[in-house]
Image: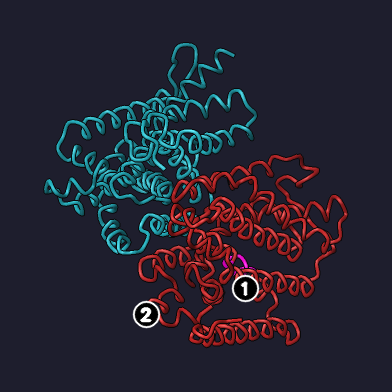
Chain colours: A red, B cyan
Amino acid sequence: MMPVSSRPQDSADRIYFTLVALIGGALMIYFALVPVFGLNVAFHFYLMLWITMASAFNVSSGFSGYLPFGYVAFYGIGAFTTAILVKKAAFPVFLALPFSGVAGLVLALLFAPTLRLSGIYFGIVSLALAGICRLVITNMPEEITGGSFGLQLGSRAHPVQSFYVMMAVMVVALATILWLSRSRLGKALRATRDDADAAEMMGINVPRVRLYGWMIAAFFPAVCGGVEAWYTNVVDTETAFNTLITAKTVIYAVAGGLGTVTGPIIGAVAMVWLDELIWRQFPLLNLLILGVATVALVLFLPRGIVGSILRRKPQWRRYVP
Amino acid sequence: MELLILNGIVNGLIVGGIYALVGVSLTLLYGVLRVVNFAHGEFVIAGSFFAYVLFTSLNVPPLLALPVAAISFFAAGWGLYYVLIPRLSRSDDPELMSFLMFYGVSITAAALMLLLFEADSRSIDYSFTPISIQVGPIYVSTARLVALAITAVISAGLALFLFRTLPGKALRAAIMNPEAIQIVGVDIVRLSAFAFALATALAGVTGVLVALVFPAFNAFSGTEYTIIAFIVVVLGGLGNPVGALVAGVLFGLAEQMATVFLPQALAQIVGFAILVGTIFLRPSGLFGTSTKK
Protein backbone atom coordinates (compact mmCIF):
# COMPACT_ATOMS: atom_id res chain seq x y z
CA MET A 1 0.00 0.00 0.00
CA MET A 2 1.18 3.51 -0.83
CA PRO A 3 1.44 5.84 2.15
CA VAL A 4 -0.94 8.82 2.02
CA SER A 5 1.90 11.34 1.95
CA SER A 6 2.92 10.32 -1.58
CA ARG A 7 -0.23 11.71 -3.18
CA PRO A 8 1.50 14.35 -5.37
CA GLN A 9 3.81 11.58 -6.60
CA ASP A 10 0.72 9.52 -7.41
CA SER A 11 -0.83 12.21 -9.56
CA ALA A 12 2.51 12.81 -11.26
CA ASP A 13 2.69 9.11 -11.95
CA ARG A 14 -0.79 9.18 -13.40
CA ILE A 15 0.19 11.89 -15.88
CA TYR A 16 3.43 10.02 -16.60
CA PHE A 17 1.70 6.76 -17.41
CA THR A 18 -1.04 8.49 -19.38
CA LEU A 19 1.68 10.09 -21.49
CA VAL A 20 3.43 6.73 -21.89
CA ALA A 21 0.20 5.09 -23.00
CA LEU A 22 -0.67 7.92 -25.38
CA ILE A 23 2.75 8.21 -27.01
CA GLY A 24 3.32 4.46 -27.07
CA GLY A 25 -0.17 3.73 -28.36
CA ALA A 26 0.05 6.38 -31.07
CA LEU A 27 3.47 5.09 -32.17
CA MET A 28 2.30 1.48 -32.29
CA ILE A 29 -0.94 2.16 -34.14
CA TYR A 30 0.85 4.40 -36.63
CA PHE A 31 3.59 1.90 -37.40
CA ALA A 32 1.22 -1.09 -37.45
CA LEU A 33 -0.86 0.62 -40.12
CA VAL A 34 2.04 1.59 -42.39
CA PRO A 35 1.97 -1.55 -44.57
CA VAL A 36 -1.84 -1.67 -44.43
CA PHE A 37 -2.22 1.78 -45.97
CA GLY A 38 0.64 1.24 -48.36
CA LEU A 39 2.89 3.95 -46.89
CA ASN A 40 6.63 3.86 -47.54
CA VAL A 41 7.67 0.61 -45.83
CA ALA A 42 11.41 1.13 -46.30
CA PHE A 43 11.36 4.61 -44.74
CA HIS A 44 9.39 3.44 -41.71
CA PHE A 45 11.48 0.28 -41.34
CA TYR A 46 14.60 2.38 -41.00
CA LEU A 47 12.82 4.89 -38.78
CA MET A 48 12.03 2.06 -36.34
CA LEU A 49 15.56 0.71 -36.67
CA TRP A 50 17.04 4.07 -35.75
CA ILE A 51 14.59 4.62 -32.90
CA THR A 52 15.71 1.26 -31.50
CA MET A 53 19.41 1.92 -32.05
CA ALA A 54 19.29 5.43 -30.56
CA SER A 55 17.25 4.25 -27.59
CA ALA A 56 19.61 1.36 -26.85
CA PHE A 57 22.59 3.70 -27.21
CA ASN A 58 20.90 5.92 -24.66
CA VAL A 59 21.18 3.11 -22.09
CA SER A 60 24.92 3.15 -22.53
CA SER A 61 25.57 6.87 -22.76
CA GLY A 62 22.51 8.50 -21.20
CA PHE A 63 22.01 6.15 -18.28
CA SER A 64 25.53 4.80 -17.74
CA GLY A 65 27.75 7.62 -19.02
CA TYR A 66 29.79 5.66 -21.55
CA LEU A 67 30.25 6.88 -25.11
CA PRO A 68 30.97 3.77 -27.21
CA PHE A 69 32.32 5.04 -30.52
CA GLY A 70 32.52 1.48 -31.78
CA TYR A 71 28.82 0.85 -31.22
CA VAL A 72 28.54 -0.50 -34.77
CA ALA A 73 30.42 -3.64 -33.62
CA PHE A 74 27.25 -5.02 -32.01
CA TYR A 75 25.17 -4.24 -35.07
CA GLY A 76 27.71 -5.87 -37.40
CA ILE A 77 28.05 -9.00 -35.27
CA GLY A 78 24.28 -9.33 -35.19
CA ALA A 79 23.99 -8.93 -38.95
CA PHE A 80 26.64 -11.56 -39.62
CA THR A 81 25.25 -13.99 -37.04
CA THR A 82 21.84 -14.04 -38.70
CA ALA A 83 23.33 -14.18 -42.19
CA ILE A 84 25.72 -17.03 -41.39
CA LEU A 85 23.13 -19.08 -39.51
CA VAL A 86 20.55 -18.66 -42.25
CA LYS A 87 22.89 -19.16 -45.15
CA LYS A 88 25.37 -21.74 -43.85
CA ALA A 89 23.43 -23.61 -41.18
CA ALA A 90 20.02 -23.35 -42.90
CA PHE A 91 18.33 -21.86 -39.83
CA PRO A 92 14.90 -20.34 -40.33
CA VAL A 93 15.20 -16.56 -39.96
CA PHE A 94 13.00 -16.43 -36.87
CA LEU A 95 15.30 -18.88 -35.12
CA ALA A 96 18.45 -17.07 -36.24
CA LEU A 97 17.43 -13.63 -34.95
CA PRO A 98 17.55 -14.53 -31.24
CA PHE A 99 21.07 -15.83 -31.82
CA SER A 100 22.02 -12.38 -33.13
CA GLY A 101 20.93 -10.99 -29.79
CA VAL A 102 22.95 -13.66 -28.01
CA ALA A 103 25.98 -12.80 -30.15
CA GLY A 104 25.58 -9.18 -29.07
CA LEU A 105 25.47 -10.24 -25.42
CA VAL A 106 28.56 -12.44 -25.82
CA LEU A 107 30.44 -9.57 -27.45
CA ALA A 108 29.31 -7.28 -24.63
CA LEU A 109 30.74 -9.76 -22.11
CA LEU A 110 34.00 -9.94 -24.06
CA PHE A 111 34.23 -6.13 -24.03
CA ALA A 112 33.15 -5.92 -20.38
CA PRO A 113 36.69 -5.23 -19.09
CA THR A 114 36.60 -1.92 -21.00
CA LEU A 115 33.94 -0.69 -18.56
CA ARG A 116 36.78 -0.04 -16.12
CA LEU A 117 37.82 2.80 -18.40
CA SER A 118 36.08 6.13 -18.53
CA GLY A 119 35.69 9.16 -20.74
CA ILE A 120 37.82 9.31 -23.84
CA TYR A 121 39.76 6.14 -23.01
CA PHE A 122 36.56 4.14 -23.23
CA GLY A 123 35.59 5.85 -26.48
CA ILE A 124 38.96 5.23 -28.12
CA VAL A 125 39.15 1.59 -27.02
CA SER A 126 35.60 0.98 -28.19
CA LEU A 127 36.52 2.39 -31.58
CA ALA A 128 39.61 0.17 -31.78
CA LEU A 129 37.65 -2.94 -30.77
CA ALA A 130 35.09 -2.28 -33.49
CA GLY A 131 37.98 -2.04 -35.92
CA ILE A 132 39.31 -5.38 -34.71
CA CYS A 133 35.86 -6.99 -35.10
CA ARG A 134 35.61 -5.75 -38.67
CA LEU A 135 39.12 -6.95 -39.54
CA VAL A 136 38.55 -10.37 -37.95
CA ILE A 137 35.32 -10.92 -39.88
CA THR A 138 36.81 -9.59 -43.12
CA ASN A 139 39.68 -12.05 -42.80
CA MET A 140 37.63 -15.08 -41.87
CA PRO A 141 37.52 -17.87 -44.47
CA GLU A 142 35.33 -17.00 -47.41
CA GLU A 143 33.19 -20.11 -46.91
CA ILE A 144 31.89 -18.65 -43.65
CA THR A 145 31.56 -14.91 -44.11
CA GLY A 146 31.55 -14.66 -47.88
CA GLY A 147 34.74 -12.56 -47.99
CA SER A 148 34.51 -9.17 -49.64
CA PHE A 149 31.37 -10.09 -51.57
CA GLY A 150 29.44 -10.66 -48.37
CA LEU A 151 26.58 -13.07 -47.88
CA GLN A 152 23.32 -13.11 -49.76
CA LEU A 153 20.40 -14.60 -47.93
CA GLY A 154 18.70 -15.78 -51.10
CA SER A 155 14.94 -15.72 -51.51
CA ARG A 156 14.06 -15.31 -47.86
CA ALA A 157 13.31 -11.59 -48.04
CA HIS A 158 9.85 -10.66 -46.87
CA PRO A 159 9.62 -6.88 -46.39
CA VAL A 160 6.29 -6.85 -44.56
CA GLN A 161 7.21 -9.68 -42.20
CA SER A 162 10.57 -8.13 -41.39
CA PHE A 163 8.80 -4.79 -40.94
CA TYR A 164 6.61 -6.23 -38.21
CA VAL A 165 9.55 -8.04 -36.62
CA MET A 166 11.44 -4.75 -36.53
CA MET A 167 8.40 -3.18 -34.93
CA ALA A 168 8.31 -5.92 -32.28
CA VAL A 169 12.01 -5.34 -31.57
CA MET A 170 11.39 -1.61 -31.24
CA VAL A 171 8.45 -2.13 -28.87
CA VAL A 172 10.46 -4.53 -26.69
CA ALA A 173 13.41 -2.12 -26.66
CA LEU A 174 11.27 0.85 -25.68
CA ALA A 175 9.43 -1.17 -23.04
CA THR A 176 12.76 -2.33 -21.61
CA ILE A 177 14.08 1.21 -21.43
CA LEU A 178 10.84 2.50 -19.95
CA TRP A 179 11.10 -0.17 -17.28
CA LEU A 180 14.79 0.60 -16.81
CA SER A 181 14.20 4.31 -16.34
CA ARG A 182 11.96 3.62 -13.33
CA SER A 183 13.61 0.49 -12.00
CA ARG A 184 16.14 0.02 -9.24
CA LEU A 185 18.73 -0.89 -11.87
CA GLY A 186 18.12 2.32 -13.80
CA LYS A 187 18.46 4.43 -10.67
CA ALA A 188 21.61 2.53 -9.70
CA LEU A 189 23.02 3.14 -13.21
CA ARG A 190 22.36 6.87 -12.98
CA ALA A 191 23.84 7.04 -9.53
CA THR A 192 26.92 5.18 -10.74
CA ARG A 193 27.24 7.50 -13.72
CA ASP A 194 27.11 10.60 -11.55
CA ASP A 195 29.44 9.37 -8.82
CA ALA A 196 30.66 5.79 -8.79
CA ASP A 197 32.30 6.05 -5.37
CA ALA A 198 29.21 7.46 -3.71
CA ALA A 199 27.07 4.81 -5.41
CA GLU A 200 29.32 2.09 -4.12
CA MET A 201 29.10 3.56 -0.65
CA MET A 202 25.32 3.27 -0.86
CA GLY A 203 25.66 -0.45 -1.45
CA ILE A 204 25.39 -0.55 -5.24
CA ASN A 205 27.43 -3.28 -6.89
CA VAL A 206 28.99 -0.90 -9.40
CA PRO A 207 30.64 -3.39 -11.79
CA ARG A 208 27.53 -5.55 -11.97
CA VAL A 209 25.17 -2.63 -12.54
CA ARG A 210 27.43 -1.32 -15.30
CA LEU A 211 27.60 -4.75 -16.90
CA TYR A 212 23.80 -5.08 -16.95
CA GLY A 213 23.42 -1.66 -18.54
CA TRP A 214 26.12 -2.49 -21.08
CA MET A 215 24.43 -5.77 -22.02
CA ILE A 216 21.05 -4.11 -22.56
CA ALA A 217 22.81 -1.54 -24.76
CA ALA A 218 24.51 -4.33 -26.74
CA PHE A 219 21.54 -6.66 -27.21
CA PHE A 220 19.27 -4.43 -29.28
CA PRO A 221 21.72 -3.20 -31.94
CA ALA A 222 22.73 -6.83 -32.51
CA VAL A 223 19.10 -7.83 -33.12
CA CYS A 224 18.66 -4.73 -35.32
CA GLY A 225 21.64 -5.88 -37.40
CA GLY A 226 20.04 -9.30 -37.84
CA VAL A 227 16.65 -7.90 -38.85
CA GLU A 228 18.24 -5.47 -41.27
CA ALA A 229 20.27 -8.29 -42.83
CA TRP A 230 17.03 -10.15 -43.38
CA TYR A 231 15.30 -7.05 -44.74
CA THR A 232 18.00 -6.12 -47.25
CA ASN A 233 18.90 -9.76 -47.92
CA VAL A 234 22.62 -9.05 -48.10
CA VAL A 235 25.42 -8.55 -45.59
CA ASP A 236 28.97 -7.43 -46.14
CA THR A 237 31.65 -6.02 -43.85
CA GLU A 238 31.71 -2.63 -45.56
CA THR A 239 28.08 -1.84 -44.73
CA ALA A 240 27.62 -3.93 -41.58
CA PHE A 241 30.61 -2.30 -39.86
CA ASN A 242 30.24 1.13 -41.42
CA THR A 243 31.20 3.85 -38.93
CA LEU A 244 28.28 5.89 -40.24
CA ILE A 245 26.01 3.51 -38.32
CA THR A 246 27.66 4.58 -35.08
CA ALA A 247 27.60 8.20 -36.23
CA LYS A 248 23.89 8.20 -36.99
CA THR A 249 23.02 6.38 -33.78
CA VAL A 250 24.98 8.87 -31.69
CA ILE A 251 23.67 11.92 -33.52
CA TYR A 252 20.03 10.84 -33.36
CA ALA A 253 20.26 10.04 -29.67
CA VAL A 254 22.02 13.29 -28.84
CA ALA A 255 19.63 15.31 -31.01
CA GLY A 256 16.71 14.13 -28.92
CA GLY A 257 18.48 14.28 -25.60
CA LEU A 258 20.29 11.58 -23.67
CA GLY A 259 18.95 10.26 -20.42
CA THR A 260 15.23 10.39 -21.15
CA VAL A 261 13.13 7.67 -22.77
CA THR A 262 11.44 10.03 -25.22
CA GLY A 263 14.63 11.87 -26.22
CA PRO A 264 16.10 9.33 -28.62
CA ILE A 265 12.64 8.61 -30.10
CA ILE A 266 12.01 12.28 -30.86
CA GLY A 267 15.61 12.75 -32.01
CA ALA A 268 15.42 9.76 -34.37
CA VAL A 269 12.04 10.80 -35.79
CA ALA A 270 13.19 14.38 -36.36
CA MET A 271 16.58 13.50 -37.81
CA VAL A 272 15.51 10.55 -39.99
CA TRP A 273 12.79 12.71 -41.44
CA LEU A 274 15.28 15.55 -42.02
CA ASP A 275 17.77 13.08 -43.46
CA GLU A 276 15.15 11.78 -45.89
CA LEU A 277 14.26 15.31 -47.00
CA ILE A 278 17.90 16.21 -47.56
CA TRP A 279 18.56 12.91 -49.28
CA ARG A 280 15.77 13.57 -51.74
CA GLN A 281 16.74 17.16 -52.45
CA PHE A 282 20.54 17.00 -52.39
CA PRO A 283 21.80 13.40 -52.37
CA LEU A 284 25.42 14.55 -52.59
CA LEU A 285 25.21 16.86 -49.63
CA ASN A 286 23.77 14.23 -47.30
CA LEU A 287 27.02 13.39 -45.51
CA LEU A 288 28.07 17.03 -45.31
CA ILE A 289 24.81 18.10 -43.73
CA LEU A 290 24.96 15.21 -41.27
CA GLY A 291 28.38 16.43 -40.14
CA VAL A 292 27.37 20.07 -39.92
CA ALA A 293 24.20 19.10 -38.04
CA THR A 294 26.30 17.24 -35.46
CA VAL A 295 28.56 20.22 -34.87
CA ALA A 296 25.58 22.56 -34.67
CA LEU A 297 23.81 20.23 -32.22
CA VAL A 298 26.76 20.13 -29.85
CA LEU A 299 27.27 23.89 -30.03
CA PHE A 300 23.69 25.09 -29.86
CA LEU A 301 21.62 22.25 -28.41
CA PRO A 302 24.01 20.16 -26.31
CA ARG A 303 21.17 18.71 -24.23
CA GLY A 304 19.06 17.76 -27.24
CA ILE A 305 15.44 18.63 -27.96
CA VAL A 306 13.86 16.98 -24.92
CA GLY A 307 16.79 17.86 -22.65
CA SER A 308 16.52 21.55 -23.53
CA ILE A 309 12.77 21.62 -22.92
CA LEU A 310 13.24 19.94 -19.55
CA ARG A 311 15.90 22.47 -18.61
CA ARG A 312 13.50 25.31 -19.32
CA LYS A 313 10.66 23.55 -17.47
CA PRO A 314 12.26 21.44 -14.74
CA GLN A 315 8.84 20.81 -13.19
CA TRP A 316 7.89 18.73 -16.26
CA ARG A 317 10.63 16.27 -15.43
CA ARG A 318 8.21 14.24 -13.31
CA TYR A 319 5.76 13.79 -16.14
CA VAL A 320 7.94 13.24 -19.15
CA PRO A 321 9.03 9.63 -19.67
CA MET B 1 65.62 -12.06 -44.60
CA GLU B 2 68.16 -9.55 -43.27
CA LEU B 3 67.32 -7.33 -46.21
CA LEU B 4 63.64 -7.52 -45.36
CA ILE B 5 64.34 -6.62 -41.75
CA LEU B 6 66.59 -3.75 -42.77
CA ASN B 7 63.89 -2.58 -45.13
CA GLY B 8 61.40 -2.81 -42.29
CA ILE B 9 63.61 -0.70 -40.05
CA VAL B 10 64.20 2.02 -42.64
CA ASN B 11 60.55 2.16 -43.64
CA GLY B 12 59.56 2.01 -39.98
CA LEU B 13 61.66 5.09 -39.27
CA ILE B 14 60.17 6.95 -42.24
CA VAL B 15 56.57 6.02 -41.52
CA GLY B 16 57.21 6.42 -37.80
CA GLY B 17 58.38 9.98 -38.34
CA ILE B 18 55.03 10.80 -39.91
CA TYR B 19 53.16 9.02 -37.12
CA ALA B 20 55.20 10.97 -34.59
CA LEU B 21 54.13 14.27 -36.16
CA VAL B 22 50.48 13.21 -36.33
CA GLY B 23 50.64 12.15 -32.70
CA VAL B 24 52.53 15.13 -31.34
CA SER B 25 50.05 17.61 -32.80
CA LEU B 26 47.09 15.70 -31.38
CA THR B 27 48.69 15.38 -27.97
CA LEU B 28 49.49 19.12 -27.84
CA LEU B 29 45.89 19.85 -28.64
CA TYR B 30 44.62 17.49 -25.97
CA GLY B 31 47.12 18.66 -23.42
CA VAL B 32 46.32 22.34 -23.69
CA LEU B 33 42.62 22.32 -24.55
CA ARG B 34 41.47 19.01 -23.03
CA VAL B 35 39.48 18.34 -26.18
CA VAL B 36 39.87 15.23 -28.27
CA ASN B 37 40.18 16.06 -31.92
CA PHE B 38 38.49 13.21 -33.68
CA ALA B 39 38.95 15.05 -36.98
CA HIS B 40 42.72 15.14 -36.77
CA GLY B 41 43.16 12.56 -39.52
CA GLU B 42 40.91 14.56 -41.81
CA PHE B 43 43.05 17.65 -41.17
CA VAL B 44 46.08 15.60 -42.23
CA ILE B 45 44.41 14.40 -45.42
CA ALA B 46 43.27 17.96 -46.10
CA GLY B 47 46.98 18.79 -46.10
CA SER B 48 47.59 16.06 -48.66
CA PHE B 49 44.85 17.43 -50.90
CA PHE B 50 46.26 20.91 -50.38
CA ALA B 51 49.61 19.77 -51.77
CA TYR B 52 47.79 17.90 -54.53
CA VAL B 53 45.89 21.00 -55.65
CA LEU B 54 48.98 23.20 -55.47
CA PHE B 55 50.91 20.70 -57.56
CA THR B 56 48.30 19.86 -60.20
CA SER B 57 46.87 23.32 -60.77
CA LEU B 58 49.77 25.67 -59.96
CA ASN B 59 52.67 23.27 -60.46
CA VAL B 60 54.05 24.00 -56.99
CA PRO B 61 56.40 21.19 -55.91
CA PRO B 62 55.53 19.51 -52.58
CA LEU B 63 58.60 20.89 -50.83
CA LEU B 64 57.46 24.42 -51.56
CA ALA B 65 53.93 23.45 -50.56
CA LEU B 66 55.16 22.71 -47.02
CA PRO B 67 55.51 26.31 -45.79
CA VAL B 68 52.40 27.39 -47.68
CA ALA B 69 50.43 24.60 -46.02
CA ALA B 70 51.88 25.49 -42.62
CA ILE B 71 50.77 29.12 -42.89
CA SER B 72 47.35 28.42 -44.39
CA PHE B 73 46.53 25.68 -41.91
CA PHE B 74 47.74 27.81 -39.02
CA ALA B 75 45.34 30.57 -40.05
CA ALA B 76 42.51 28.10 -40.63
CA GLY B 77 43.10 26.51 -37.22
CA TRP B 78 43.11 29.90 -35.51
CA GLY B 79 39.74 30.72 -37.08
CA LEU B 80 38.27 27.32 -36.40
CA TYR B 81 39.22 27.61 -32.74
CA TYR B 82 37.08 30.69 -32.23
CA VAL B 83 34.15 29.14 -34.10
CA LEU B 84 34.16 25.83 -32.23
CA ILE B 85 35.78 25.90 -28.83
CA PRO B 86 34.49 28.86 -26.76
CA ARG B 87 30.86 27.68 -27.01
CA LEU B 88 31.92 24.13 -26.26
CA SER B 89 33.40 24.95 -22.87
CA ARG B 90 29.98 26.07 -21.68
CA SER B 91 28.43 22.60 -21.94
CA ASP B 92 28.01 20.19 -19.03
CA ASP B 93 30.75 17.78 -20.02
CA PRO B 94 33.20 19.58 -22.35
CA GLU B 95 35.55 16.62 -22.85
CA LEU B 96 32.87 14.19 -23.98
CA MET B 97 31.02 16.83 -25.98
CA SER B 98 34.28 17.76 -27.71
CA PHE B 99 34.61 14.17 -28.86
CA LEU B 100 31.13 14.35 -30.30
CA MET B 101 31.62 17.72 -31.92
CA PHE B 102 34.87 16.73 -33.59
CA TYR B 103 33.14 13.58 -34.74
CA GLY B 104 30.86 15.96 -36.63
CA VAL B 105 33.83 18.00 -37.83
CA SER B 106 35.44 14.81 -39.10
CA ILE B 107 32.30 13.82 -41.04
CA THR B 108 32.03 17.36 -42.39
CA ALA B 109 35.67 17.47 -43.50
CA ALA B 110 35.48 14.04 -45.14
CA ALA B 111 32.25 15.02 -46.91
CA LEU B 112 33.77 18.27 -48.15
CA MET B 113 36.79 16.46 -49.56
CA LEU B 114 34.49 13.88 -51.10
CA LEU B 115 32.50 16.64 -52.81
CA LEU B 116 35.63 18.41 -54.04
CA PHE B 117 37.75 15.44 -55.10
CA GLU B 118 35.30 12.52 -55.39
CA ALA B 119 35.94 9.11 -53.90
CA ASP B 120 38.89 8.15 -56.11
CA SER B 121 42.32 7.76 -54.58
CA ARG B 122 44.70 10.55 -55.54
CA SER B 123 48.45 10.73 -55.61
CA ILE B 124 50.96 13.41 -56.44
CA ASP B 125 52.83 12.51 -59.59
CA TYR B 126 56.03 14.13 -58.47
CA SER B 127 59.42 12.50 -58.27
CA PHE B 128 62.85 13.58 -57.23
CA THR B 129 65.93 12.83 -59.31
CA PRO B 130 67.33 10.29 -58.67
CA ILE B 131 64.13 8.40 -57.87
CA SER B 132 65.82 6.26 -55.26
CA ILE B 133 69.00 6.29 -53.24
CA GLN B 134 71.03 3.32 -52.07
CA VAL B 135 71.19 3.05 -48.29
CA GLY B 136 73.58 0.25 -47.45
CA PRO B 137 72.30 -2.79 -49.30
CA ILE B 138 68.77 -1.47 -49.97
CA TYR B 139 67.20 1.15 -52.16
CA VAL B 140 64.90 3.77 -50.66
CA SER B 141 62.89 6.26 -52.68
CA THR B 142 64.30 9.77 -52.45
CA ALA B 143 60.87 11.19 -51.63
CA ARG B 144 60.72 9.01 -48.53
CA LEU B 145 64.22 10.00 -47.42
CA VAL B 146 63.41 13.67 -47.93
CA ALA B 147 60.25 13.18 -45.88
CA LEU B 148 62.30 11.53 -43.14
CA ALA B 149 64.73 14.46 -43.09
CA ILE B 150 61.84 16.94 -42.93
CA THR B 151 60.13 15.10 -40.07
CA ALA B 152 63.42 15.07 -38.18
CA VAL B 153 63.88 18.81 -38.71
CA ILE B 154 60.29 19.61 -37.71
CA SER B 155 60.51 17.41 -34.60
CA ALA B 156 63.79 19.02 -33.54
CA GLY B 157 62.35 22.46 -34.21
CA LEU B 158 59.27 21.63 -32.19
CA ALA B 159 61.33 20.32 -29.30
CA LEU B 160 63.47 23.48 -29.32
CA PHE B 161 60.33 25.60 -29.44
CA LEU B 162 58.70 23.76 -26.54
CA PHE B 163 61.75 23.75 -24.29
CA ARG B 164 63.71 26.88 -25.21
CA THR B 165 61.20 29.62 -26.05
CA LEU B 166 58.71 31.41 -23.81
CA PRO B 167 55.54 30.55 -25.81
CA GLY B 168 56.68 26.93 -25.93
CA LYS B 169 57.22 26.86 -22.19
CA ALA B 170 53.82 28.46 -21.74
CA LEU B 171 52.29 25.63 -23.79
CA ARG B 172 53.96 23.00 -21.63
CA ALA B 173 52.93 24.83 -18.51
CA ALA B 174 49.34 24.94 -19.74
CA ILE B 175 49.44 21.18 -20.22
CA MET B 176 50.70 20.69 -16.68
CA ASN B 177 48.45 23.13 -14.88
CA PRO B 178 45.97 25.30 -16.79
CA GLU B 179 44.84 27.13 -13.63
CA ALA B 180 48.26 28.11 -12.37
CA ILE B 181 49.35 29.52 -15.70
CA GLN B 182 46.47 31.98 -15.65
CA ILE B 183 47.59 33.22 -12.25
CA VAL B 184 51.00 33.99 -13.76
CA GLY B 185 49.22 36.19 -16.26
CA VAL B 186 48.99 34.12 -19.41
CA ASP B 187 45.90 34.69 -21.56
CA ILE B 188 44.69 31.07 -21.72
CA VAL B 189 42.23 31.74 -24.54
CA ARG B 190 44.90 33.13 -26.82
CA LEU B 191 47.30 30.38 -25.83
CA SER B 192 44.64 27.76 -26.58
CA ALA B 193 43.91 29.35 -29.94
CA PHE B 194 47.62 29.26 -30.63
CA ALA B 195 47.83 25.58 -29.63
CA PHE B 196 44.89 24.75 -31.87
CA ALA B 197 46.42 26.66 -34.78
CA LEU B 198 49.82 25.06 -34.21
CA ALA B 199 48.31 21.57 -34.10
CA THR B 200 46.34 22.25 -37.26
CA ALA B 201 49.42 23.62 -39.02
CA LEU B 202 51.39 20.52 -38.00
CA ALA B 203 48.57 18.32 -39.29
CA GLY B 204 48.60 20.16 -42.62
CA VAL B 205 52.37 19.84 -42.97
CA THR B 206 52.13 16.15 -42.05
CA GLY B 207 49.53 15.80 -44.78
CA VAL B 208 51.96 17.13 -47.37
CA LEU B 209 54.51 14.56 -46.17
CA VAL B 210 51.86 11.83 -46.31
CA ALA B 211 51.36 12.69 -49.97
CA LEU B 212 55.11 12.24 -50.47
CA VAL B 213 55.52 8.99 -48.55
CA PHE B 214 52.34 7.00 -49.13
CA PRO B 215 51.26 5.99 -52.60
CA ALA B 216 47.73 7.37 -52.47
CA PHE B 217 45.09 9.03 -50.31
CA ASN B 218 41.37 9.64 -50.60
CA ALA B 219 38.64 11.54 -48.81
CA PHE B 220 38.13 8.70 -46.33
CA SER B 221 41.78 8.04 -45.43
CA GLY B 222 41.43 10.44 -42.52
CA THR B 223 39.99 7.91 -40.07
CA GLU B 224 43.09 5.72 -40.41
CA TYR B 225 45.32 8.61 -39.38
CA THR B 226 43.01 9.57 -36.56
CA ILE B 227 43.30 6.08 -35.13
CA ILE B 228 47.07 6.06 -35.63
CA ALA B 229 47.23 9.42 -33.88
CA PHE B 230 45.24 8.00 -30.96
CA ILE B 231 47.55 5.01 -30.72
CA VAL B 232 50.62 7.23 -30.69
CA VAL B 233 49.12 9.68 -28.20
CA VAL B 234 48.06 6.92 -25.82
CA LEU B 235 51.41 5.14 -26.15
CA GLY B 236 53.29 8.34 -25.45
CA GLY B 237 51.02 9.38 -22.61
CA LEU B 238 48.14 11.84 -23.06
CA GLY B 239 49.47 15.37 -23.34
CA ASN B 240 53.12 14.39 -23.47
CA PRO B 241 54.68 15.80 -26.68
CA VAL B 242 58.09 14.16 -26.31
CA GLY B 243 56.42 10.85 -25.49
CA ALA B 244 54.33 11.15 -28.63
CA LEU B 245 57.41 11.76 -30.80
CA VAL B 246 59.16 8.65 -29.47
CA ALA B 247 55.97 6.58 -29.49
CA GLY B 248 55.29 7.55 -33.11
CA VAL B 249 58.65 6.25 -34.27
CA LEU B 250 58.29 3.10 -32.14
CA PHE B 251 54.82 2.45 -33.52
CA GLY B 252 55.99 3.01 -37.09
CA LEU B 253 58.77 0.47 -36.52
CA ALA B 254 56.39 -2.02 -34.90
CA GLU B 255 53.90 -1.68 -37.73
CA GLN B 256 56.47 -2.08 -40.49
CA MET B 257 58.10 -5.05 -38.76
CA ALA B 258 54.65 -6.60 -38.34
CA THR B 259 54.14 -6.42 -42.09
CA VAL B 260 57.47 -8.23 -42.52
CA PHE B 261 56.73 -11.08 -40.13
CA LEU B 262 52.94 -11.38 -40.09
CA PRO B 263 50.33 -11.88 -42.78
CA GLN B 264 48.80 -8.58 -43.84
CA ALA B 265 45.49 -9.14 -42.10
CA LEU B 266 47.17 -9.70 -38.74
CA ALA B 267 49.52 -6.78 -39.23
CA GLN B 268 46.53 -4.45 -39.42
CA ILE B 269 45.20 -5.77 -36.14
CA VAL B 270 48.56 -5.19 -34.40
CA GLY B 271 47.95 -1.45 -34.17
CA PHE B 272 44.55 -1.86 -32.56
CA ALA B 273 45.91 -4.49 -30.20
CA ILE B 274 48.74 -2.19 -29.12
CA LEU B 275 46.22 0.56 -28.44
CA VAL B 276 43.89 -1.61 -26.37
CA GLY B 277 46.80 -3.27 -24.57
CA THR B 278 48.43 0.04 -23.63
CA ILE B 279 45.25 1.51 -22.25
CA PHE B 280 44.74 -1.52 -20.05
CA LEU B 281 48.29 -2.19 -18.95
CA ARG B 282 49.91 1.24 -18.92
CA PRO B 283 47.18 3.87 -19.13
CA SER B 284 49.71 6.65 -18.53
CA GLY B 285 51.69 5.61 -21.59
CA LEU B 286 55.06 4.00 -22.10
CA PHE B 287 56.92 6.77 -20.31
CA GLY B 288 54.28 7.77 -17.78
CA THR B 289 55.11 7.51 -14.13
CA SER B 290 51.92 8.38 -12.31
CA THR B 291 48.86 6.34 -13.21
CA LYS B 292 45.96 8.55 -14.07
CA LYS B 293 42.50 7.16 -14.60
Q: CA distance from mark 2 to mark 1?
A: 28 Å
A49 or B2: nearer the viewer: A49
The image quadrant where one finds the C terminus of chain A is bottom right
Quadrant for residue A98, please give it: bottom right
Quadrant for residue B61, please give it: top left
Q: Which residue is mark 2?
A: A312
Q: Is residue A100 magenta?
A: no
Residue found 41% across the figure and 51% down from its top: B39
A275 or B207: nearer the viewer: A275
Residue found 42% across the figure and 78% down from its top: A310
Q: Residue B52: x and y, percent?
A: 40, 45
Q: Are marks 2 and 1 in contact (CB under 8 Å)?
A: no
Give the chain letter at badge 1.
A
Q: Residue B177: x and y, percent?
A: 24, 44
Q: Identify the amino acid type marked 2.
A: Arg
Q: Is residue A102 left or right of residue B239?
A: right
Q: Identify the amino acid type marked 1.
A: Leu
Depicted B31 relative to depicted A230: above or below: above
Answer whether residue B218 is visible to the viewer in this image.
Answer: no
Residue found 33% across the figure and 49% down from its top: B34
Q: Is residue A18 left or right of residue B177?
A: right
Q: Is residue A51 magenta?
A: yes
Q: Residue A112: x and y, percent?
A: 60, 47
**What secondary structure is found at the residue carrying circle 2?**
helix
At label 2, counting other C-alpha atoms closer than 10 Å, the crowd grade (few under 14, some 14-19, many 20 or more) is few
Question: Which mark is on residue A47?
Answer: 1
Numbered range of the magenta stretch: A47-55
